[in-house]
Image (tube, helix red, strand yellow):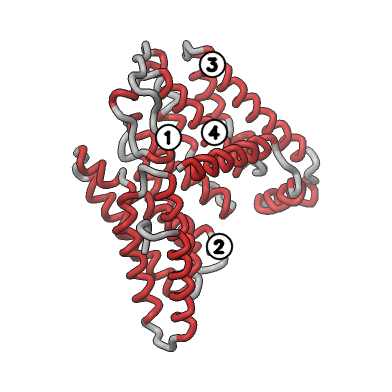
């Protein structure tokens, strides 16, 4: 059913399964069916990369699974707890002996697609018991990103970082994840300042369809440019989800410090300019938040929680600088993805 069939066939199968569930009176049918669907998805998601069309079919399969999961929230919580725990146990087992093969078993399409599946399930079920599993899922993704600090795994780690951004933006919960890109990318001064190698191929595979950077592409100027560009874009999406927080200016102090240090040490003028523009964007957002904070009435506020609630009312309907920039990036990314699907 998953990734092998046409998208229309997957959707037709989904409607058939949902109808069977609604008409059946057998209580154990839902759990049996969802386990079978998840196991089949995990099996077929090993081939999640290499083509945008394959990823599109997997995305449709994920959406079908998530929607079907909403039919029984109680059983859905038990399944989520069980399978997220299995992913955590697998990660812990691999961390005890960090060999190249063990890292590959975690930095794989199968592991990523399973994490993404539960991210989608949990972020679309905010009013149910499934939302209680957000914290262990965030810890799992953080552990996966920290498994290796080698920049050759940048494509996989960027995908995992985007999952944390998804959780932060959809649930409204603060997810401290900016340090992953700041420490792995924007502290690698020697790597970006080293003399680049000549690109031998005509092009480099898109980050969206690969898990790691090949050795022949690693030190090319084109790859270095891509790492900096996509890291700044990923940070834009993350910080946009936190841009309307009352404590945003304080949260940005270490971010601005790390970026300013990278800008100071970078030899490449394009990197310096792009990072400078991003810092200015952050400072503009901080100024907007600070201006709104001056409108808070201190006499009517007696508890810290009331500060957050009062600021949320002031910020409602206001589009901050980082949110505007993230919206532009999202529109551009959707247009590029549509064009690539048409070409393929």
Q: Residue at x 58, y 32 (%)?
A: 252
Distance in Å between CA atoms under marks 3 and 4:
15 Å
Q: Residue 319, located in which quarter of the rendered image?
A: top right
Q: Residue at x 43, y 48 (%)?
A: 53
Q: Which residue is drawn at 52% across and 36% down?
A: 234
Q: Residue 153, located in which quarter of the rendered image?
A: top left
Tell me, yes or no, whether the two marked residues, 1 and 2, touch with CB atoms within 8 Å: no
Disc 4 element:
helix
Work out which quarter of the rendered image holds the N terminus and state it: bottom left
Distance in Å between CA atoms under marks 1 and 2:
33 Å
Reading the image, the residue beneath label 1 is 206
Q: Is residue 21 above or below residue 266?
A: below
Disc 3 element:
helix
Is there any visible trace of residue 273 in the rendered image?
yes
Tell me, yes or no, whether the two marked residues, 2 and 3, touch with CB atoms within 8 Å: no
Distance in Å between CA atoms under marks 4 and 1:
15 Å
Residue 273 appears left or right of 11: right
Distance in Å between CA atoms under marks 1 and 3:
21 Å
Disc 1 element:
loop
Residue toward you, 205 or 243: 205
Q: Earlier in the sequence, mark 1 or mark 2?
A: 2
Could you classify mark 3 by the number of other residues whose Cα lies within 10 Å: few (under 14), some (14-19), or many (20 or more)?
few
Q: Where is residue 284 in the image (x, y as percent from the top left)?
A: 69, 29
- Residue closest to the far bottom: 25
Q: Which mark is residue 126?
A: 2
Is there any visible trace of residue 72 in the rendered image?
no
Reading the image, the residue beneath label 3 is 270
Work out which quarter of the rendered image holds the C terminus and state it: top left
Reading the image, the residue beneath label 4 is 233
Residue toward you, 12 or 29: 12
Tell me, yes or no, whether the two marked residues, 1 and 3, touch with CB atoms within 8 Å: no
Disc 2 element:
loop
């Amino acid at each position: 059913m998953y990734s092998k069939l046409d998208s229309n066939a997957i959707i037709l199968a989904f409607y058939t399964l949902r109808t069977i569930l609604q008409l059946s009176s057998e209580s154990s049918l839902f759990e049996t069916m969802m386990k079978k669907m998840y196991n089949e998805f995990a099996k077929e998601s090993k081939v999640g990369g290499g083509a945008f069309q394959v990823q599109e079919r997997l995305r449709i399969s994920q959406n079908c699974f998530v929607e079907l999961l909403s039919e029984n929230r109680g059983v859905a919580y038990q399944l989520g707890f069980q399978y997220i725990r299995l992913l955590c146990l697998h990660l812990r087992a691999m961390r005890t002996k960090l060999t190249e093969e063990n890292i590959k078993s975690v930095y794989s399409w199968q592991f990523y697609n399973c994490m993404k599946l539960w991210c989608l399930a949990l972020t679309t079920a905010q009013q149910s018991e499934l939302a209680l599993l957000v914290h262990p899922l965030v810890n799992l993704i953080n552990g996966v990103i920290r498994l290796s600090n080698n920049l050759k795994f940048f494509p996989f780690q960027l995908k995992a970082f985007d999952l944390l951004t998804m959780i932060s933006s959809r649930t409204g919960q603060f997810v401290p994840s900016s340090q992953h890109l700041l420490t792995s990318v924007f502290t690698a001064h020697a790597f970006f300042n080293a003399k680049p190698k000549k690109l031998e191929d005509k092009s480099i595979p898109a980050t969206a369809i690969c898990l790691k950077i090949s050795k022949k592409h690693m030190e090319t100027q084109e790859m270095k440019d891509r790492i900096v560009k996509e890291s700044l874009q990923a940070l834009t999406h993350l910080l946009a989800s936190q841009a309307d927080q009352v404590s945003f200016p304080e949260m940005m102090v270490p971010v601005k410090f790390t970026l300013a240090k990278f800008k100071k040490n970078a030899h490449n003028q394009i990197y310096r300019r792009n990072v400078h523009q991003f810092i200015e964007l952050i400072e503009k957002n901080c100024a907007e938040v600070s201006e709104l904070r001056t409108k808070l009435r201190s006499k009517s506020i007696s508890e810290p929680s009331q500060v957050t609630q009062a600021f949320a009312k002031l910020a409602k309907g206001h589009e901050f600088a980082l949110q505007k920039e993230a919206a532009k990036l999202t529109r551009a990314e959707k247009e590029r993805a549509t064009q690539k699907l048409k070409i393929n």
